[in-house]
Amino acid sequence: MLTNRRKDALVAAVLVAPFLAIYLLVFVWPTIQMFGISFTDAPLIGSGEWVGLDNYTRLDTDPRFRTAAWNTAYFVLLTVLPGTIVALLIALGVSRLKGRLQAAILALFFLPYILPVSVVYLIWDWVLNFQFGILMHVLDLLGLDRIPIMKTRDWFMPAVGVVTIWWTAGFSILLFLAGLRAIPPEIYEAAALDNAGRWTTFRRITWPLLWPVTSLVFTIQLIAQLKIFDQVYLFSQGGRPNDNMVLVYYVFQRAFQQDQGGRAAAVAVTLFVLVVVVSVLQFQLLRLAGGRK
Amino acid sequence: MTTIHLQRANFWGGVITVLTILLALLWAFPLYWGVISSLKPEDEVVRPYIELWPETLTFSHYTTAIYDTQIVTWYINSIAVAVGVTVITIATSMLCGYALSQLKFPGRKALWWLILASFMVPTQALIINHFVLTSQLGLINTWAGIMLPQLIHPVIIIVYKQFFDQVPKDFREAAVMDNAGEFRILFKVYLPMNWGVTTALSIVTFIWTWNAFLWPFLSVTKTEMMTVPVGITQVNDAFGVYYARQLAAAVLAGLPVAVAYLLFQRKVTEAITLSAGIKG
């Protein structure tokens, strides 16, 4: 007869096994492999010769990698902080509404987030269409020159940034609303009794109490936007992918279009390390923020 | 004094409310515009002025999209993949979450850290080796291949563990007294008590999988194996662009997830806030 503890362990092993098997297969193994082939000149499929750190040292002088790194950073700058602020303002507005009206208005802001990226792309590609897009009609009405937005280098990233904020703000708004609901109404009542103005109330009560959510929204977006690919790829179709290069796109191009698995893996490892470092920093910051309370 | 103060507060409060509502309408306008354009004849779509409501309402682009493109095939692929991923992910996560929550076993701490650590892994960086793995298994251009790297959502395990942790210990003790095995306890006690969160997590997993782009795009090269979001952007007609038809395809692609959201609004928002680590 098995002791309780051994029985527990056996049952646990059975319960955990399916997850663990998939986890090892699609997370751990590919990660190890990625590091491995980044030191070789392997094509996408097949093995290659050991080249040491060559793939990494080449990145330093690779103009396209620089473009990709720069564009990714630029995109982060364009979306993360502005996206957080926009979502916070909208959440403050939505939180004033009550009942069904609030649910309806929230749904309008949230709906884009639920859609596939390709639907977002097709809708905005149509809105921004140089010949027939509604935005071009608006520019005409305002007496401004039409711009082929997604075909213009300077406009591409800001425009993709705007579309991305439009697409994803619903998620951040939702988190902010949850945070706002968690603030006890008594605190606001006390502030109202003290005749505190709207701005003072926000600065002294809402902002500090909402800070954990704000930092969460900020870091979730930061990590998500470092991994940007879909929108940039879709909007670059038939345009200038090499000017709009971002890190994941570069991994894709090297591996899948130029069949250079090793060189692509070096870029992938760079991205991997970058995201892990940011995540660890985020975790530490959140822990610090939690510890202060 | 206070009445004036209050009146002023009400006035500005009203202004903020009106602005919020107007912004919401503006926010949703591109969606409206996409849908309404898909209901116009092609020649009306390209008129040189803004036409907020179609002169002739037509569903012909939808019938064309359904009969003349492969969208029905893509639909079947998307549904198969999304259902498969949802069932497997929810099942494996629930089992693992239950073990982490209710059982003591060697390696429990290590497993917990492994799951937390996996939050940091950017799956986008793994595309090369996911492709290598999938092709080694001979799964390129198959449903299983599209599903494979999408089968892991560590956050679902964490949510399950939290919910199982909250089930009062009395239930468990009573079941153990009855000599019930762990599987019985899980399926007769813990799971029924957590149907709500299970449906919520299932709905969002379905939505996430339906919406996935990068991996389905990479792992499929044959048009008949594409999922809807990939197919509608990667397959163009050989004879020019049909804007309205393309938008009709976009509407069809977004419809299942939009309907899922509108029907289960509460569940979806609950699961999404939970998955971000906030108690809804």
Image (cartoon, coloured by chain):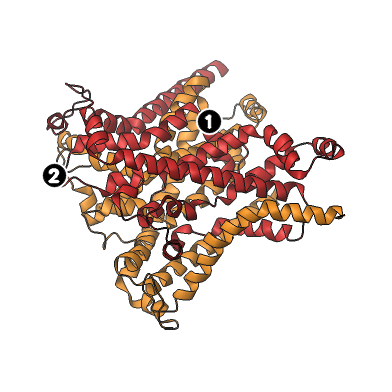
Chain colours: A orange, B red
Residue A190 is left or right of residue A158, and the answer is right
The x and y percentages for residue B182 are 76, 44
Residue at 44% of width from left, 45% of height from top? B81
The x and y percentages for residue A68 are 34, 64
Residue at 64% of width from left, 47% of height from top? B158
Vertical comparison of A182 with B213: above or below:
above
Q: Please identify the quarter of the rendering in which residue B71 is found.
A: top left
Q: Please identify the quarter of the rendering in which residue A244 is found.
A: bottom left
Comparing B214 with A285, the one in front is B214
The x and y percentages for residue A108 are 41, 30
Q: Chain of mark 2?
A: B
Give, as a three-letter code, the residue at label 2: Gly
- Report whether residue B275 is seen: yes
The x and y percentages for residue B195 are 63, 33
Disc number for residue B240: 2
Label 2 SS = loop
Comparing B233 with B188, the one in front is B188
Circle 1 is placed at which residue position? Answer: A198
Q: Chain of mark 1?
A: A
